[in-house]
Image (cartoon, coloured by chain):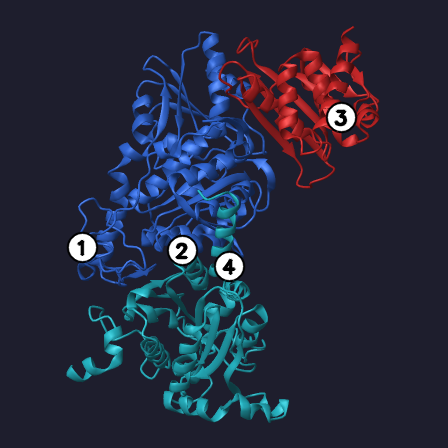
Amino acid sequence: MTVKLMQGNDAVGWGALAAGCRFYAGYPITPSTEVAEMLSRELPKVGGKFIQMEDEIASLAACIGASVGGLKSMTATSGPGFSLMQEHIGYAAMTEVPCVVVNVQRLGPSTGQPTSASQGDVMQARWGTHGDHPIIALCPTSVSQSFDLTVKAFNFSEKYRTPVILLLDEVIGHMREKFDMPDFDAIERVDRIATDVPPEWYKPYGDSLSDVPPMANFGDGYRYHITGLFHDPHGYPTQRLDEIDPWIKRVHRKIERNLHDIVLYEEDWDPTNKTVVVSYGASARSARHAVKLARQHRLKVGEITLLTIWPFAEEVIARMARTARRIIVPEMNLGQLALEVERVAGRSKVVRVNRANGEMVTPQEILDAIEGS
Amino acid sequence: MTKTIQNDRTEIRLAGEGGQGMILAAIILAEAAAIYDGKNVTQTQVYGPEARGGASKAEVVISNGQIDHPEVINADVLVAMSQEACDKYAGNLKKGGLLIVDEEKVGRIPSNKAVKIPITQLAEARTGRTITANVVALGVLVGLTDVVSRMSIEKAVLARAPKGTEDMNRTALLAGFEAADMVKR
Amino acid sequence: MAQHEEHTAYEYLRPSKKFPNVWCSGCGIGVVMSALIRAIDNIGLEKDNVALVSGIGCTGRMPVYMDFNTMHTTHGRALAFATGLKIARPELKVITIMGDGDALAIGGNHFIHSARRNIGITAIVVNNNIYGMTGGQYSPTTPIGGRATTAPYGNIEPPMPICELAQAAGASYVARSTVYHAAELERYIEQAIRKDGFGLVEAVSYCHTGYGRLNKLGTAVDMMRALKETSMAQAAAQKLAPEERENKIVRGVLHDVERVEYTARYQQLIDQVQQSIGGR
């Protein structure tokens, strides 16, 4: 183990390698490019493959193709590129092909401000592609957590056969912190469940107790069909309601029944805290700073940091809202996750602290909100 | 409310024009603190999209404890390598904070307590290359503040120096230390 | 039934998949499908080692009927998905099947870059000059003056030369035939699959339901006959003056060169890198 100074984006690359990522396709875009640069250098060393595609649409397509071929795959992008990837996020959800999409959020809309930070893609991560679909999105708050959550992203993706979005922001992506590279062999790696039935019995989208059907890779002797159309358990297109309905229920159920595994957060509050700060990503750093300042002044304030933002951590927020009177939600946007907090906050008042100008929310702004009752 | 939090939190801002190596200087300083002094650091930066020119700002926060907000809130130290940088960031200095300016580049100085050193000139005189000005600046900064040990910053500078430029970079760093010692006397 | 089972194609179709297919009766796409099956059979490829990747449109529906590793992707992006798959599994024969709108309009960027990389994918473009599935809108290969539901006064855009585009972008094999010339089409597809690098086969077809009806070109049989009458072999075409060649479909192997294939080159890169770091 060697201590290094490392950027969040680099830590994402190392996390991917540790998780077993062996394919990366991407298109250069600030502020995510370091991920691509790092993996173009490191992947061939471990026999992995890197390709710079002609655009972001192609990048995610290639990742899905490679994943179908059996390689754990990732792409990384920012703002405009994330917009371009939306159709294929839906395709991955529909076809249940594991892949990891990193979005280092920058200030938007449109070209916006490429080197400025933002958390403006929270709702896009949830609802960016058309149609009802489940999604997992993770938000690291530090460099070492960027590594850890990248590993988690791959593991969730493989375990639940779903695209996973790793939502960094420019602050976390470009920030350098001390990082102790863990021993890769000691890292828990989850691989997709392989099928053990003979090829003629294999149903790519059916017959699984866990709602996550085993996945055969192309070339392994299980010939089957993959389509973005609604499909039956064999993978063949269907228009039958009695096949469409179970599918949509199953793919939602496979996430909803596993919230205890998927929804990650850090909490530091108790029922005597009348004010609790709920935050994620870089804003969580400002929040923690403000909470410490407030506690030094003997204000009883709690905090919850969401590491998984989708699916939303309803249970803990609702439980906290039963005793907290005010919930403060700092975000580098005009209030996106605050909408979800409000949805489950009951009678608690949700106070938004927002910045959408490319800068971090300051600890003082959050402190002012904590103090102003 | 006064800020009594995290008394050992030291906030340093290095600002200048793109191409002056301010971000690299901040990285080296952060490496000295994190790797060789074993402290916690966060290093952040703001820069324009262009690789050369434009305003450039890099920050380092150093602490023995956990660092929460990763950016400078009120700088303990500002190194200003251009007039624009000085104008923009001097006002954010903490009361009693240290302002270091490149004397040759910064004419208007908002404080009579600022430390004025011809950093770029020194770099050229001692190493023959103005490009080492960022290392001279690190020498001045560490020489005056001891935010990291002199030994650590030297190790960090040499670890980053391209092969064959170690002596030049050591010379630049020592020039910074000397200039700092002159000020102290 | 017995008769069907004796047919080569039967072995390669999916018995559990519900037939009939989505295509209009008389459509040329089925001719391309059977030419592809015969080409694969001629080479003797294992079904497990073949992957068919398609986009959206009438042609995009072809792989579902065929008993290989099959992937029906998004509109225009078959080559991008296929690129990832080929890189992950270079040992697979990856074949993309696209329509003209699919490959050349929405997928034009992937088309030229796949050719440029010379990645070992066989690209079959079934060119019927129209968007069939959406009901007959003009495509990048609709002839000037041709009517379409979005060109009610006649198309004013020049058509995209598919083969010339692929050649210019770097494909190592380029050929064109028609659905009338099924045996020739089969031969070209076979040659393209045998090629290590990027191989393109343009299969000129027709859409009697969409384009044919709007332009009063008659039945499927009439349009099939027209392919016979308006097409000619490359050797014969070269003897004609350029203006005489203008409205002819020139058939033949238009380009065939050896260039290093992408995934092979990437493997070399891996070997070099691993050697330089002493293996890992």
Establish whether labels 4 and 1 are both on one chain: no
Res A264 quadrant in image:
top left
Same chain check for tags 2 and 1? no
Q: Separation of disc 4 and disc 2 at Cα? A: 14 Å
Asked if labels 2 and 4 touch by Cβ distance under 8 angstroms, the answer is no
- Tell me the distance, in whole angstroms, between the alpha carbons under discs 4 and 1: 36 Å
For badge 3, the amino acid type reads Met
Nearer the observer, disc 3 or disc 1? 1
- Dot 2: within a 10 Å radius of its alpha carbon, few (fewer than 14), some, or many (20 or more) residues? many
Which percent across, then down, holds residue A373?
45, 15
Front one among B5 and A129: B5
C-alpha span from label 3 to label 1: 69 Å
Q: Which mark is in front, 4 or 2? A: 4
Residue A9 location (% of width, % of height): 51, 37
- Gap between marks 3 and 4 measured at Cα: 47 Å
Q: Is residue B75 visible?
A: no
